[in-house]
Image (cartoon, coloured by chain):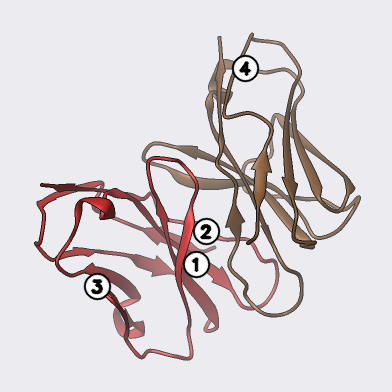
Chain colours: A red, B brown
């Protein structure tokens, strides 16, 4: 069975600080996809990124960056120079490449950026 | 833009009532999903569907059923609502095929069972 763990339940930082959200996953399969979603106060989950297990290159998109390390089964998410609009709940999720398209989600990390 | 809509943002029902949660997507997606979200537990999959009239159980199907009579609509049914079904319910859809498309989510329905 697959499992995703986000050990940080809540994080609170001051605006402009950098912050990293941790994600650790478990699967016996060697081929899978990893996702990050953002859930702002409005409630609707917004897709941020998808990575497949074949590609361990880190990715940067503006102030967002992702560090994927198969050796430690981690897919961490860093926000640089955080802004109040980054306040949300963030979810990490895993999906196997073979079989059903169901996502397995972590518990979520509530991020609060204080002005 | 993909749009996934859910019939209600907030719903209050009594124990024992039959409850219908409706989800509609407008992008001709084959796959549709129902999740419930609870604090500290993340999102857990209740049921999903790959096609019309097709359904598969997710991780927590007990106490729920689903219906998919049309491609764009996926309904979640609580046959006899109980207080432990008080939760946020999220619907999602994604294209079919072999690639791992992201799922598109609706705004959620916060259900309270009293």
Residue A94: mark: 1
Residue at the image point whose x is 39% and y is 67% from the top? A25
Q: Give residue A24's quadrant in the image.
A: bottom left
Element under label 4? loop
The residues tagged by marks 3 and 4 sit, at their Cα atoms, a distance apart of 44 Å
Q: Look at mark 4 in the image and give the residue it sits on.
A: B82
Q: Look at mark 2 in the image and give the residue it sits on.
A: A104
Q: Look at mark 3 in the image and give the residue it sits on.
A: A63
Element under label 2? strand
The residues tagged by marks 1 and 2 sit, at their Cα atoms, a distance apart of 5 Å
The residues tagged by marks 4 and 2 sit, at their Cα atoms, a distance apart of 25 Å
Residue at the image point whose x is 34% and y is 73% from the top? A75
Residue at the image point whose x is 78% and y is 35% from the top? B65
Q: Give residue A78's quadrant in the image.
A: bottom left
Q: Are marks 3 and 2 in contact (CB under 8 Å)?
A: no
Whether residue A65 is situated above or below residue A43 in the rendered picture: below
Dot placed on the residue nearer the N-terminal end, 1 or 3: 3
């Amino acid at each position: 069975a697959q499992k995703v763990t986000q050990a940080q339940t809540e994080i609170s930082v001051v605006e402009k600080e950098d912050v990293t959200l941790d994600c650790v996953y478990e699967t016996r399969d060697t081929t899978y996809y990893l996702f990050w979603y953002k859930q702002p106060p409005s409630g609707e989950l917004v897709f941020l990124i998808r990575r497949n297990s074949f590609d361990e290159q880190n990715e940067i998109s503006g102030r967002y960056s992702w560090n994927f390390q198969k050796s430690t089964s981690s897919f961490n998410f860093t926000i640089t120079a955080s802004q109040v609009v980054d306040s949300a709940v963030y979810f990490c999720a895993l999906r196997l490449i073979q079989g059903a398209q169901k996502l397995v989600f972590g518990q979520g990390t509530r991020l609060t950026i204080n002005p | 833009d993909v749009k996934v809509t859910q019939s209600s943002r907030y719903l209050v029902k009594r124990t024992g009532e039959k409850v219908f949660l409706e989800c509609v997507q407008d992008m001709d997606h084959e796959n549709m999903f129902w999740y419930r979200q609870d604090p500290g537990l993340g999102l857990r999959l209740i049921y999903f569907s790959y096609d019309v009239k097709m359904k598969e159980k997710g991780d927590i199907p007990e106490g729920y059923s689903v219906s998919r009579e049309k491609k764009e609509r996926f309904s979640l049914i609580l046959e006899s609502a109980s207080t432990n079904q008080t939760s946020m319910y999220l619907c999602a859809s994604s294209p079919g095929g072999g690639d791992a498309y992201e799922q598109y989510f609706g705004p959620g329905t916060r259900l309270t069972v009293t």
